[in-house]
Structure formats: structure tokens, C-alpha cells
């Protein structure tokens, strides 16, 4: 197995506070066994050097992805961000405040899952802070006002603020508060009005902008009470959205123009006797189907990990812990059944289209993936997922029946 090893600079090993903070990072992260948080595995001293061992995550940090690509599409940004909130909420429930939530501290792994890391300045609720009184710790662009003005008395709502800054960055590609110096940035965090993210990205809806602005409210009492509430608002926002088939609409307008040119007789026949779905349908269905396949594969992967934890808990006689893992497995199995229903519905819609058109669109889809500026490992994973959808489409179109739990599991775990 591969592991990542963080070492404390030899020049700092004689400083008690640095050693204690380094150990605290390992101790805090070891408490956090969550799929969206990088897992700590060991901490040791050797020849007066200190080492912190954690699982190796193959991926790119979110900050680098944003720097390379700029703002992320809303659906992609929210899919990533919801998982970040789940990880932060888990840490908060364990009594740990991160205090340095920012895009470089989120690694996007090969499957597209965000993994929160670097709990180096995290603190337990009510524990001693290893900083001098009045000395703020964090990164200026993401720090809450209270983290700057009163760092000894912050709570989990400071992470809510930083997460709101992160969401702003993901949706706009820029920071809400910037400046020529750390001092000027902090001054804006404390005193400057909150900028509406729609000024940087007009495509952001008013509802989503309100969510971002609530998260970065200067007053902690006026923010979300925690990451769970933050997550709940985003899910409600997504549920309230009415999908608008923009591409089919464009296709229809183009078709009507061509119909007028070709002639009234042909136009009348096309309008009265629509026999096939829109030419844009294969592209949209392949895109949606690939995302559904990715979600299903992630669920299967997480279940396999939880099963391992369940076995360990059982061997230790931890009945309550084991029951918790069983409940998690049951919940994910229900999600899989719901996801398979949607997945098979997409396959059914693809099967109703002309096979040459669908196969041609798959070829174009793979070419588009290769032309993206995403990290190679992310592109490779997305191609594997798309290949699963293509394989299942071919099986479905050959009338081999719908894709069941076992077939999907094998395809995901063997990819």
C-alpha cells in the first residue's frame, strides 16, 4: 500500500509547541474515520524526528483544479461541495474544528471524491489552543472575521464561513476578498461588505447566491448553525430546481428554421408525426448516465470499506459501533436500488434511439473527455465510468435485460 508521510522540520523538533501541534494534528485526524477525510494511520518518533503517516490519496488538490480550469459548473461544484460539508459536519460532531478550510486542503481523488486533509491547526472544542493570545491562525482569504479578531473563542461556525468562501471560489473562480497584503485581506474579511457572487458569475441563480451570502455572514449567529444545515439548504435548492432542456430547445429552434426552408409539406409531417427524440438526446443521456454510474460505483466502493470496518468492530466486540455500520450499509443499499432504477431508465431511453447515433455520440463523448483540462487520473476515471455505461447500453440494446445490483457491482469494482 502507498502512504503519505509528513515530517516535522528538524529545526522545529526542539520547540515544544510545534511538537505538540504536530502530534495534535495526528491525534485529531486519527479520530476522523470518514470517506471524505484523509485517514491518519500512524504517528511516531525516530532519532528525534517526528513523523505523521496517513493514507495516500492519488489526485489533485481543489485549489490547483480551480486555478487550471477557473470556475466550476454548478452541478459539479455542488456535487463536490456537498461531500466536503459531510466531512466537516462529521469532524464537528467529533468536536473538531478544522480552522483552515480552503481549496488546497481538499484533494479530489481519482473517482472525483473530495478528501479533506491538513488538520494541522485544528482544535478540539474546549481544548487548549497552541497559539499565543490574539494570534490568529489560518489562511487570510478564507478566515472568518471572528477567527481574525478573537481567535481564542471560535466555534464550528468559523468553518461554515470558510466553507462558504470555498463555495464562492468554486462557483466564480475567484476569492470574494483579496488584496495586496495579508493585512488588507483580513481587514476586508472583517469590515468589507460581502460581494454577491453573481457579480463574478451571472449564471449563478439568486437562490444559490443567497445561500453563499448567508454562509459568509460577518455575524456567526446569522450564518448556518452548522454544516448539516448548510448541506440541507443546498439539497433543498437542488430539489427545487426545474430542469430546463436548453440544448433540445436550441435544436428545436434550428429544426423549425430548416423546416421552413425545406417546405411546408415536410414541416407539417415533422410536426404532426414526431418519430424520434431530439438529436441532442444521446449527448444528454450519456452525460446523465455517466454521472449516475459514478454515483452507483461510489456507493459500492463505500459499502466495501464499511464492511471492512464492520468486521473489525465485530472482532472487537463493539456491538454499538457494528450496528452503526450495519445501518450505514442498509442506507447505501437503499440508495443503490434507487440509483439503479434511474440508471435503467436512462438505458431504456438510450435504447429507444438509433443505435448508430448513440455509438457515434459515445465516440464524441470520449474525445471530449480527452480534450478536458482535468488531471489525467480524473479523466481516466471518467472514461472508465463512461465505458461501464457503454457496455451496459450494448447489453441492454441486445435485449439481455436490465442491469441489476450484482451486474453493476461487478462492473464498478472491476473497472
Image (cartoon, rainbow, N blue to C red):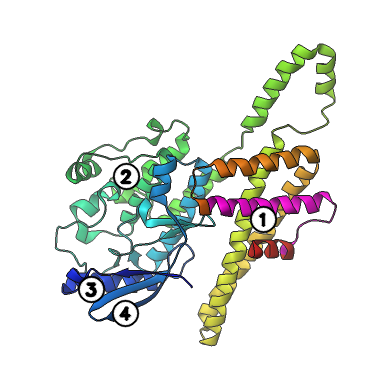
Residue at 31% from the left image edge and 57% from the top image edge: 100
Q: Is residue 222 magenta?
A: no
Label 1: how many Cα within 10 Å (few below 14, some 14–19, many 20+): some
For the record, the magenta segment spans 378-405
Front position in the image: 109 or 182: 109
Badge 2 is on which residue? 217
**Looking at the image, is mark 1 or mark 3 nearer the viewer?**
3
Q: Quadrant of residue 338?
A: bottom right
**Viewed as shown, does residue 135 lie left or right of 72?**
left
Tell me, yes or no, whether the two marked residues, 2 and 1, touch with CB atoms within 8 Å: no
Q: Earlier in the sequence, mark 2 or mark 1?
A: 2
Badge 1 is on which residue? 339
Q: Earlier in the sequence, mark 4 or mark 1?
A: 4
**Looking at the image, is mark 4 or mark 3 nearer the viewer?**
4
Assign the C terminus to one quadrant of the image: bottom right
Residue 414 screen position, x and y as percent? 66, 64
Tell me, yes or no, whether the two marked residues, 3 and 2, touch with CB atoms within 8 Å: no
Q: Earlier in the sequence, mark 4 or mark 3?
A: 3
Q: Earlier in the sequence, mark 2 or mark 4?
A: 4
Label 2: how many Cα within 10 Å (few below 14, some 14–19, many 20+): some
Badge 3 is on which residue? 20
Label 4 residue SS: strand
Label 1 residue SS: helix
Amino acid at each position: 500500500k502507498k502512504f503519505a508521510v509528513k515530517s516535522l522540520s528538524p529545526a522545529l523538533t526542539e520547540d515544544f509547541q510545534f511538537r505538540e501541534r504536530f502530534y495534535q494534528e495526528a491525534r485529531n485526524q486519527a479520530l476522523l474515520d470518514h470517506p471524505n477525510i484523509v485517514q491518519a494511520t500512524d504517528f511516531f518518533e525516530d532519532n528525534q524526528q517526528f513523523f505523521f503517516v496517513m493514507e495516500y490519496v492519488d489526485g489533485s488538490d481543489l485549489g490547483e483544479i480551480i486555478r487550471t480550469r477557473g470556475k466550476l459548473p454548478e452541478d459539479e461544484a455542488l456535487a463536490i461541495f456537498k461531500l466536503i460539508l459531510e466531512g466537516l459536519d462529521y469532524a464537528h460532531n467529533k468536536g473538531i474544528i478544522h480552522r483552515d478550510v480552503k481549496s488546497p486542503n481538499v484533494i479530489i481523488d481519482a473517482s472525483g471524491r473530495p478528501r479533506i486533509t491538513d488538520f494541522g491547526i485544528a482544535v478540539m472544542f474546549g481544548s487548549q489552543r497552541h497559539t499565543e493570545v490574539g494570534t490568529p491562525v489560518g489562511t487570510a482569504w478564507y478566515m472568518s472575521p471572528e477567527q481574525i479578531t478573537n481567535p481564542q473563542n471560535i466555534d464550528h461556525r468559523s468553518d461554515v464561513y470558510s466553507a462558504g468562501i470555498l463555495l464562492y471560489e468554486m462557483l466564480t473562480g475567484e476569492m470574494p476578498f483579496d488584496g495586496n497584503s495579508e493585512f488588507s485581506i483580513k481587514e476586508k474579511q472583517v469590515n468589507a461588505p460581502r460581494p454577491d457572487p453573481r457579480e463574478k458569475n451571472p449564471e449563478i441563480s439568486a437562490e444559490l447566491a443567497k445561500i453563499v451570502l448567508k454562509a459568509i455572514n460577518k455575524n456567526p449567529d446569522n450564518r448556518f448553525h452548522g454544516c448539516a444545515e448548510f448541506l440541507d439548504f443546498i439539497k433543498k435548492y437542488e430539489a427545487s430546481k426545474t430542469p430546463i432542456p436548453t440544448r433540445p430547445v436550441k435544436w428545436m429552434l434550428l429544426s423549425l428554421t430548416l423546416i421552413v426552408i425545406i417546405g411546408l409539406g415536410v414541416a407539417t409531417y415533422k410536426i404532426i408525426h414526431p418519430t424520434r427524440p431530439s438529436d441532442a438526446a444521446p449527448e444528454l443521456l450519456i452525460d446523465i448516465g455517466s454521472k449516475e454510474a459514478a454515483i452507483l460505483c461510489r456507493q459500492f466502493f463505500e459499502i466495501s470499506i464499511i464492511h471492512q470496518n464492520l468486521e473489525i468492530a465485530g472482532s472487537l466486540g463493539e456491538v454499538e459501533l457494528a450496528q452503526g455500520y450495519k445501518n450505514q450499509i442498509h442506507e447505501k443499499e437503499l440508495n443503490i436500488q434507487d440509483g439503479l432504477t434511474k440508471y435503467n431508465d436512462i438505458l431504456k431511453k438510450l435504447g429507444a434511439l438509433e443505435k448508430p447515433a448513440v455509438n457515434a455520440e459515445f465516440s464524441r463523448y470520449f474525445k471530449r473527455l480527452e480534450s478536458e483540462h482535468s488531471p489525467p487520473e480524473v479523466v481516466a476515471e471518467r472514461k472508465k465510468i463512461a465505458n461501464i455505461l457503454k457496455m451496459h447500453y450494448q447489453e441492454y440494446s441486445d435485449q439481455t435485460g436490465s442491469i441489476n445490483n450484482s451486474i453493476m457491482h461487478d462492473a464498478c469494482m472491476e473497472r
